Image (cartoon, coloured by chain):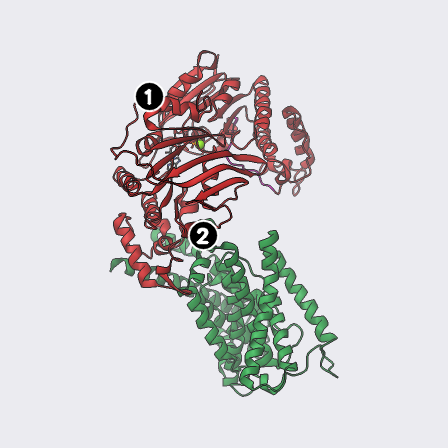
Chain colours: A red, B green
Amino acid sequence: MTYAIETHQITKVFGDTVANDRIDLQVIEGHIHAVLGENGAGKTTLMKILFGEEQPTSGKIQIRGKTVMISSPAEALRLSIGFIHQNFTLVNEFTIGQNFALGIEPRKNLFFADYDKVNQKVQKILDLLDMPLKLDVPVGSFSVEERQIVEIGKALYRGAEILILDEPTSVLTPQKIEKLLDILRKLRDEGKTIIMITHKLEEAFSIADEISVLRKGNLVATLPRASVTKDQLIRLMVGDEPLSVVEKAPHQFGAALLEVKNLCVRSGGRDLVKNVSFEVHRGEIFGLTGVGGNGQGELIEALVGMRPATEGDILFDGTSVVKWDIRKRRLNGMAYVPENRVTRGTAVSLSVLDNLVMGHHYLPDFHQGLVLKQKKMESFALDIIKQYEVVASSLEINAGSLSGGNLQKLVIGREFSMNTPFLIVAYPSQGIDIRTTKYVQSELIRRRDSGCAILLVSGDLDEIFSLSDRIGVMYSGELVAITTPESTNRFELGQYMVGSRRNGQ
Amino acid sequence: MKATNKIRRTIFQQGLSFISTIALALLLGFVMLWLNGSAPKDVLAAAGSSTFASPFRFANMISRMLTIVLVSLAAAIPFKAGVWNIGGDGQLAMGGFFSAMVGVYVTSLPPVLHIGLAVLAGMAGGALWAAIPAYVRLKFKANEIVTTIMMNYLAALVTGYLVNYPFRAPGSANAETSLVQESAILSQMVPLSNLSTGLYIVIATFILICFLDWKTSWGYEWRVLGSNDEFARYGGVKDNRMRFLSMLIGGALAGLAGTILVLGSYHKFILNLGGGIGFTGVLIAIIAANSPILILIVSAIFAILSNSTVGLEARLGIATEFSSILQSVIILLVITRSNIWAGITKLVKRR
Ligand SMILES: Nc1ncnc2c1ncn2[C@@H]1O[C@H](COP(=O)(O)OP(=O)(O)OP(=O)(O)O)[C@@H](O)[C@H]1O
Ligand SMILES: [Mg+2]
């Protein structure tokens, strides 16, 4: 038995985060190796190191027994390692052949690439993958799963013997997932070594020979598929320290402020949110959790109006809001701290001031007709900066020059100071220090106690557990469980999150 | 305060790099001409003479500049909101045509009213011509770069037909309308020149645009839309409505440029009224990073340059194309100026 890949004490540090902590991973040649772990466990980072996209802070890598330095993706390819990224890297306007040969085109003569030669090789690979695709159309015209498989073909074209796939199934429908898994099995039978990151236990179970689990940057175990149970894996993923609850007054149920009724969101032929119903009451923090990409994001977008609901209804204070635009929902009392502060929560090329007044600028206080009240906006912005301790040298500097934590405080400050009766807060403690996290948490509880309805979305079980009055778990677009912190535990939530259990089972 | 000093410094550096790049481009121009056998002294004299030698030449430069400023703003306002308006030429033509119609066929109005009506018609014509591609973009997601360019051709064809057939001046050998009524003429400000009292209209418009840009929620929302449209949407900006509005205003500005050419310079609508100036406007908007003040400066430079060609050709026999070459050099240098500056700083630091 030989190892295709062996890492020794691989460590990767980003600033204050230890993304990988002394990892010893062993991948057997000719096997499929699944890698599991919660969001942020360090899976992608480890794979990027193996592909030369990131350099380890310390540690050593062996490929087929030989110690190597993987300084770049080109070097990784030379070592016959291929990486299929979570997001696509194909040039949509190019054909399959043009994509595969991009940068390494064989020459017919001085000026022209020999695409006939390329296409012969491409055809062989497509036959191997059992994918009859047209060679003369741009890849942008293919479906998502076809492109996913073309990505695999590209790695094969470039001579990959070791294939690393980062959550390849997250964008596929269930039937297509089966097809992809079949292809991977076939490739294994051809002698390829495959590493596949996934959040779905089911997949790991159906395909892997070995399964590794990462938790908070550590490799907690590598186990042969045959000798492990799902429950064991869940425990490894979520850990078994007891969850702590933040001190807070007992839950005072008010009237339901937000009522979600059989909400469905469909996009690109996929059901992203399936028939979800729940309420958030005044004076309640409803914690919504799940592995990233199981429909939480789309659900929130539907609630705030950034994405149409395909079916179902959203009642806010008794009124249906599905037809309202974003501004109307905001004006009527919704505020939202988004998950991604850089792409959604701010405009990093604009000033701190411009970023702080967004959404406030159409409130009666801040404008007179078309004209914005500059002085008022400035003093308001300074207040937020002071209250939320945003470290910014002035209101005029670019928001992009703030550190991640300060940018997060800016977003939280802006949304909290709308003083709305309803707040959606997604991943609030992402990237902020402990002191600010504590402040944000106590602020959430203060608002809850004063009658605010709060929808807290987070993948961090500790955070969900310590703040929520009730907890909902989403898996594959469905709200599979609604429970309370008192009546559940880490393991059970883990089971809901990976889809091995539903409410009442 | 320390912070504001820092801002002042960055603005100063920005301005400095901008101005020095243009100076560098001009220097390059001199070197090119020198190699071609014209002494820098003569070049400067010849170029300067075509703008500064007499009041009417200077006035012509200003008149040229008015058109350039307007078409640049016509591109810059939609750019700010993240929409490409390459259709300045078409909007200018339609604006000019609409104002000519009011100028020629509406009679017996007092001058103020007549001019006001013609200006409104011109702006409406430009806005209308911009509204079509804007609507198509918002409704059908058709790329506005393509559609606005198409609208330019369409405007040329439509106005071409209109002034060749139904609205051709009786007895005229050229494709043009009759002269506008006396009451619709923007009077000449400097004898022998193209400069009309349209100057005041442009100044007022310029101030209004600056005000919109700096002080109002429109300007704010355009800015946000242009720099991160997802953030804008998230914050409740009515993105499509604001994009549409920015195109309407851009179109109206280009239409106004056409109007002033008709009412102030030609006193009639002629074919190819703008002479392709719309595209220059797009370039200037990019160079000036959509800032109205920088647009003013760059427009002045471009107006002087394009004026100079006349003198250079007459006195030194330098082909008029030279000014286009120089404009291209400026554009290249300004667009790559941050890289050039980084390179220079690196060199200096290494010393
Ligand atoms: N370039 C970077 N700079 C700073 N921190 C980073 C960087 N890349 C990753 N991290 C941090 O390292 C940790 C591990 O991230 P990684 O992307 O490896 O997680 P993951 O296991 O792939 O999670 P997911 O399941 O969400 O994809 C996270 O805390 C992340 O924020
Ligand atoms: Mg990842």
Q: Where is residue B202 in the image (x, y as percent from the top left)?
A: 49, 75
Horizontal side of A214 relative to B132 (left or right) equals left
Q: Quadrant of the C terminus of chain A?
A: top left
Q: Residue tagged by mark 2?
A: A328
Establish whether ligand 1 lies closer than 8 Å to the Cβ of label 1. no
Camera sees residue B23: no
Viewer-closest of B317 and A480: A480
Residue A72 place in picture, x, y as percent? 46, 33
Q: Mark 1 lies on which chain?
A: A
Q: In this view, does B83 lie above or below A38?
A: below
Amino acid type shown at disc 2: Lys
Secondary element at tag 1: loop
Question: Which residue sits at x=46%, y=54%?
Answer: B237
Q: Start and end of the magenta stretch? A: A80-92
Q: In this view, does A462 lie to the left or right of B319?
A: left
> Which quadrant of the structure image shows residue A144?
top right
